Amino acid sequence: MKYYAVIDTNVLVSALLKWNSVPGSILQLVIDGDIVPIVNEEILEEYKDVLFRPKFKLNNGIIERLLYRISEAGIFLAGESIDIDLPDEDDRVFYEVVMESRKDVESYLVTGNLKHFPIEPFIVTPRQMLNIILADNNE
């Protein structure tokens, strides 16, 4: 079964900083093709801007391969502007893209910062996303 998800940047950072973690498992599912990433150019730019920050000391080659994989496997969607107040305006694009995606397919927004988004059943933590996938695979 395929899952569709907008992956918040903080999940990618957490995964790359600690691969043997729940965010790492989510990223592995993206790499393996079980989770289809939903992106647009603005999201990819944020990924790049954040992941290449020197403070994270991440391997540039790994970042480049990851961004390539996400670009190749991802579905590109332009999110329609939504009138909503969010604590961090940088998160708007993630919310707008998941809302656009949900018009056609069941999609999730996977984030480590639930408090940055409205309370919705499709806005989940990496652990919740993993639990959804595991529950489906056990049926």
Image (cartoon, rainbow, N blue to C red):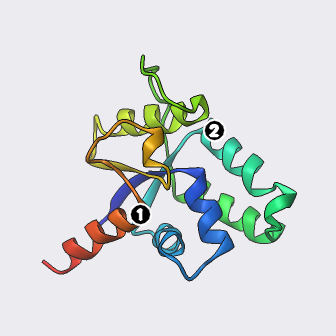
Query: Element at badge 1?
Result: strand
Q: CA distance from mark 2 to mark 1?
A: 19 Å
Query: Element at badge 2?
Result: helix
Q: Which of the two residues, 12 or 5, is positioned nearer the viewer here?
A: 12
Q: Position of residue 85 (x, y in %)?
A: 46, 22
Give, as a three-letter code, the residue at label 1.
Answer: Ile
Give above or below for 136 relative to 95.
below
Q: Residue at x 53, y 68 (%)?
A: 27
Question: Which residue lies under the disc numbered 1?
Answer: 35
- Confirm whether residue 69 shows in the render: no
Q: Is residue 66 left or right of residue 108?
A: right
The numbered mark, 2 or 1, whose residue comes first in the sequence reads: 1
Residue found farthest to the top: 83
- Confirm whether residue 105 shows in the render: yes
| Figure quadrant of residue 36 | bottom left
Q: Residue at x 35, y 63 (%)?
A: 129
Q: Position of residue 115 (x, y in %)?
A: 44, 43
Q: Which mark is residue 41?
A: 2
Viewport quadrant of the N terminus:
bottom left
